[in-house]
Image (tube, grey):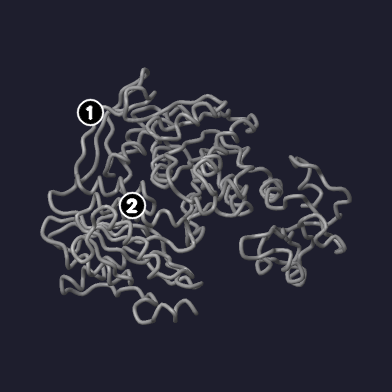
């Protein structure tokens, strides 16, 4: 494609004198540049892409886009006011605006995005619809599953458009796209032309990035304002907003949304509500009720918060996509579970062991509440709080566990270049503020593998042990190094040791045999 053709449908001022060159791909990392590629240089938190322009040219870049005035003396350089914001539109143009040939369902929220996205995908499959999905973990295109990264954020803008284009090529008609606040604030999904927008909740998270709840909420709300600019599509586009009547974000979104909207929740004031809810350790049952229909719904997922996630998916599918209520309910029931979300690890022990992704104050709260309903024994929680992230979460999560769990084990969760001992002290202060007694109701065990072992040794018959915060993730960051880590592998390894049976080996972390000073140095 000619570089000038990327600007044909550009929503910002088009620069003058665009070089007459052919582009064969797009990259934002100079190491990924191949001959003929367009290199887009952007400023980041720790690096400036303009510094890597020489390397991109050395690797064969045919043209470079960067900020105005940064490298304007270079041949085939195009200066833009905001290259990051422009990237998503340039990538969409390069791939032929694939979202215009798909029905695009966007899911955002602090907690429950992945679950709701999976539920919606399962409903679409049950309805016989050829669907794909893009998440913070992977992209599913037919039978192909592509990894999208170690940690949780929306894929980069040009990758999102590439995935969408491959879905169009594969003959898919629908896509469920999980979007994060970082993804919206960095304009990664601006050109995705959403048809249905779903929010799970907006609670305390990422204040280190956004500064306040209001700013964080505004980033999430861009999903709903984007509905207004979605163009008419051949298959039609409902531009429906699905919002949570029970969440603190409701009043704001109810007045903010300018497109058709429908609410869901557990209360009678919701447009789609749950009635006759029944909880058990094996799942949930309820009746989804509206003025238009009533449908019995069951799920293998557990906890009140998953009733909400199921309602969100049902509402979007039925009112946004026109799927029959009974078909939607069958889709909900067909989802066995979600990796790393309240995932039970059973090697024959006489207590319950669970791995969950709960890494925010609200997620930990609802997870512990769900665990309480799953057992008549004690609830034992293992969790940490990430380094170089929102520090307020540290004492908040420890306070919640001190109040809702019987026993708490404070440990590592991606300490990065911060002092793990310092993080644990902040958490311990939170636990003490709610009556926790160190050595009796809570403990500090820096090494996460040893923390899980310790929690298992505390467990008695009928108890439940939850390892929270990592879930499905495949790595943990110490210093500036990502170490391979899977909480599910760690739980199985610890259980095998506990039971004295053959099993998996505990994954390695530097906290096992290095001092903190050593791993901080790398």
Judge left or right: residue 146 versus residue 510.
Answer: right
What's the mark number on residue 133?
A: none
Considering only vertical position in the picture, is 265 above or below 120? above
Disc 2 secondary structure class = loop
Horizontal and vertical percent for residue 114? 42, 47
Please identify the quarter of the rendering in which residue 102 is found.
top right
Q: Are marks 1 and 2 in contact (CB under 8 Å)?
A: no
Relative horizontal placement of residue 382, taking residue 64 as reference (left or right): left
Where 34 falls versus 435 (above or below)?
A: below
At 72% from the left and 68% from the top, the residue drawn is: 52
Q: x%, y% of residue 413?
A: 39, 64
Dot 1 crowding, Cα within 10 Å, few <14, some 14–19, many 20+ = few
Q: Position of residue 353 (x, y in %)?
A: 22, 59
Q: How crowded is the residue under tag 2: few (<14 C-alpha within 10 Å), some, or many (20+)?
A: many
| Residue that carries the numbered disc 2 in the rendered image | 341
Towards the viewer: 158 or 454: 454
Name the residue carrying label 1. Answer: 276
* Residue appearing at x 30%, y 68% in the figure: 490
Viewer-proximal residue among 429 and 50: 429
Nearest to N terminus: mark 1 or mark 2: 1
Q: Is residue 179 above or below residue 290?
A: below
- Residue 222 picture quarter: top right
Give the x, y percent position of residue 331: 35, 38
Q: Quadrant of residue 21?
A: bottom right
């Amino acid at each position: 494609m000619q570089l000038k053709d990327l600007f044909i449908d550009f929503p910002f001022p088009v620069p003058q004198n665009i070089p007459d060159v052919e582009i064969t791909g797009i990259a934002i990392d100079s190491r990924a540049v191949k001959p003929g590629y367009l290199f887009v240089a952007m400023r980041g938190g720790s690096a400036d892409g303009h510094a890597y322009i020489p390397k991109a040219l050395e690797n064969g870049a045919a043209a470079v886009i960067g900020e105005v005035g940064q490298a304007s003396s270079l041949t085939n350089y195009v200066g833009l006011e905001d290259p990051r914001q422009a990237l998503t539109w340039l990538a969409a143009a390069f791939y032929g605006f694939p979202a215009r040939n798909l029905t695009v369902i966007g899911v955002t929220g602090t907690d429950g995005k992945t679950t709701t996205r999976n539920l919606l995908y399962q409903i679409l499959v049950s309805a016989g619809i050829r669907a794909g999905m893009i998440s913070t973990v992977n992209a599913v295109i037919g039978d192909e599953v592509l990894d999208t990264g170690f940690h949780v954020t929306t894929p980069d803008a040009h990758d999102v458009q590439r995935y969408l284009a491959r879905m169009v090529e594969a003959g898919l008609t629908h896509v469920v796209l999980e979007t994060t606040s970082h993804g919206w604030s960095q304009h990664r999904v601006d050109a995705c032309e959403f048809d249905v927008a779903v929010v799970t909740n907006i609670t305390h998270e990422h204040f280190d990035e956004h500064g306040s709840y209001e700013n964080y909420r505004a980033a999430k709300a861009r999903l709903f304002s984007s509905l207004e600019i979605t163009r008419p599509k051949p298959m039609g586009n409902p531009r429906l907003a699905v919002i949570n009547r029970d969440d603190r974000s409701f009043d704001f979104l109810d007045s903010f949304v300018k497109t058709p909207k429908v609410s869901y929740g557990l209360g009678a004031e919701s447009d789609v509500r749950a009635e006759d809810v029944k909880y058990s350790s094996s799942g949930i049952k309820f009746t989804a009720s509206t003025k238009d229909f009533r449908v019995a719904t069951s799920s293998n997922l557990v906890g009140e918060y998953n009733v909400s996630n199921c309602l969100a998916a049902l509402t979007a599918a039925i009112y946004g996509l026109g799927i029959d209520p009974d078909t939607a309910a069958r889709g909900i029931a067909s989802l066995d579970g979600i990796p790393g979300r309240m995932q039970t690890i059973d090697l024959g022990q006489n207590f319950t062991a669970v791995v969950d992704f709960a890494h925010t104050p609200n997620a930990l709260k609802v997870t512990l509440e769900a665990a309480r309903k799953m057992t008549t024994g004690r609830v034992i929680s293992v969790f940490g709080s990430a380094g170089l992230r929102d520090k307020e979460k540290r004492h908040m999560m420890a306070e919640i566990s001190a109040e809702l769990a019987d026993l708490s084990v404070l440990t590592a969760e991606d300490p990065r270049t911060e002092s793990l001992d310092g993080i644990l002290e902040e958490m311990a202060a939170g636990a003490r503020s709610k009556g926790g007694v160190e050595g009796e109701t809570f403990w500090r065990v820096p090494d996460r593998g040893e923390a899980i072992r310790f929690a298992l040794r505390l467990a008695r018959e009928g108890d439940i042990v939850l390892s929270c915060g990592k879930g499905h993730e495949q790595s943990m960051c110490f210093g500036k190094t990502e170490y391979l880590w899977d909480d599910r592998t760690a739980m199985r390894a610890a259980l095998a040791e506990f039971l004295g049976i053959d099993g998996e080996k505990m994954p390695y972390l530097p906290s096992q045999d290095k001092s903190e000073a050593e791993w901080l140095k790398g």
